Image (cartoon, rainbow, N blue to C red):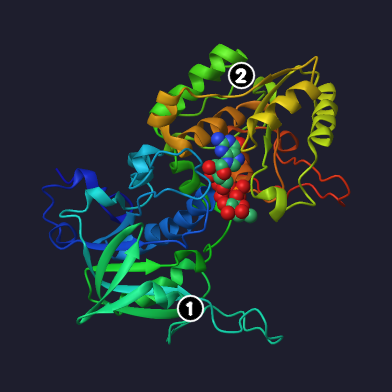
Amino acid sequence: KCTVVKDGYCPVDKSSSCSDSAFLNPRYLFYDVNPSEGFNLRRDVFMRLAVFMHKFAKKHNEWKLVLPPWNHLYHWKSDFKQDHLPWRHFFDVDSMKEFAPVIDLDEVPEEPSEVDLVYSLQHFENAFTTKKWDWSDRFEIKPCNGTFSKYREVGSGYLASLWGSLFQSKDVKCVSFQGRASLLEELLDDDAHIRIVIDRAEVALHDSFGDKLYWECRRSMRFAQRLVSEANAFRQSYLNSTDDLDGTRIPARWQDQKGIVRKVKGGLYICAHLRRGDFLYGRKNEVPTLESAADQLITVLVEQNLKTVFLCTDGDEADKLKLKLLLTGYTVVTYEPTSAELNSFKDGGVAIIDQIICSQARYFIGSHESTFSFRIQEEREIRGFPVEHTFNRFCGLNEKCEQPSKWEIVF
Ligand SMILES: C[C@@H]1O[C@H](OP(=O)(O)OP(=O)(O)OC[C@H]2O[C@@H](n3cnc4c(=O)[nH]c(N)nc43)[C@H](O)[C@@H]2O)[C@@H](O)[C@H](O)[C@@H]1O
């Protein structure tokens, strides 16, 4: 049954009777991210590791990258618990497996409560304060800085909280780390352990941001089909938008997409991603007042000769109502799940549905330095929108406003 050794590894789900030593003696690379990071930065951290695994697995096909379950994130405001969600709740993990050997935690045989070793990444001390900065890629096992308090010595090992569960680790090593994720290869090469955790994985950087491999990995991150279906049904019902009408259809398999022609029109609406929440104080100069946001939207609507805005925001009901009033004469559409739908999709799924609807709009305007907006821009790049219809953002009232960098897709 182990049919494929394409690109040097067998996709794990097709491998049950493979006699390859990789399947007889699998090794698992777990990872975790600083708990305060949001959903869309976590997706970016995943990509850094997935690109690394894509290359590493060609030489060491016994390794699988284990996707850390999603635990209730700070931004998930619904009051029901949203813990231990596997990646397949949000993403098409089978599609992701076609890029790199990744598995959800519950696919690890005998889900472990014990790992062999945690490498906890940390920045070099004074890395950002000394004037003489050493830019070279490097790492060094060092005494642990603040993050070490996360690990408690118990008996001959350690107890650690990883992705919201308690784990025992035989050992913990802190690694001052500076550079690309592929530097991890040197750490793993010298190691004979079976279950290794890379904690604070966000410290590792992209091997190469925005190159062909980056985009292959990004294209493989298709959303879970039920979220796509829900977004598509909503588009059809409330925005008269379908892939065929809008010309936004892409091949069913990401591997079959060979390029884009930047002629895609999209649905007859603009999408506004208006980040509020913690941005109201964290990015207060760049967040527009609602009056200013409405003015900026009217300018775009007139320019694009459109009458409809799909509003996607983490603002509250009062914000949405006020914006609707400020846009009287235009139609403002929002995706409002029933409580049963919210319970089923969860806050993260609803956010993805918002993102999917935005990725199909004729024109997109997002929020300054929001990774939520960045991921929408990437989806639109995959569909082939003209760049000027994608890389736009709201400006703060008194800000010297620069538009976002144009990170164009590469095949
Ligand atoms: C500055 C940093 O910005 C980072 O936010 P930023 O990149 O926008 O993007 P995220 O890291 O994804 O965090 C924002 C979260 O807020 C919710 N959210 C934001 N906008 C929308 C929306 O339009 N629709 C829906 N349904 N949900 C939204 C959603 O849960 C999303 O994952 C933060 O994660 C960090 O904590 C920090 O504040």
Label 1 sits on a secondary structure element that is helix
- List the residue tagged with mark 2: 246
Instruction: Write the residue at 86% across / 51% down.
Output: 399
Q: Is residue 220 above or below residue 180?
A: above
Residue 153 percent across, percent down from the top left: 28, 80
Q: Is residue 266 above or below residue 93?
A: above
Residue 133: name its quadrant: bottom right
Query: Mark 1 is on which residue type?
Result: Gly
Residue 274 percent across, percent down from the top left: 69, 38
Label 2 sits on a secondary structure element that is helix
Q: Nearer the viewer, residue 282 or 25?
A: 282
Q: Which mark is residue 146?
A: 1
Q: Which mark is residue 352?
A: none
Earlier-in-chain disc, 1 versus 2: 1
Instruction: Write the residue at 82% across / 46% down.
Output: 396
Q: Residues within 10 Å of mark 1 (few under 14, many from 20)?
A: few
For marks 1 and 2, give the CA distance: 51 Å
Q: Nearer the viewer, residue 20 or 43?
A: 43
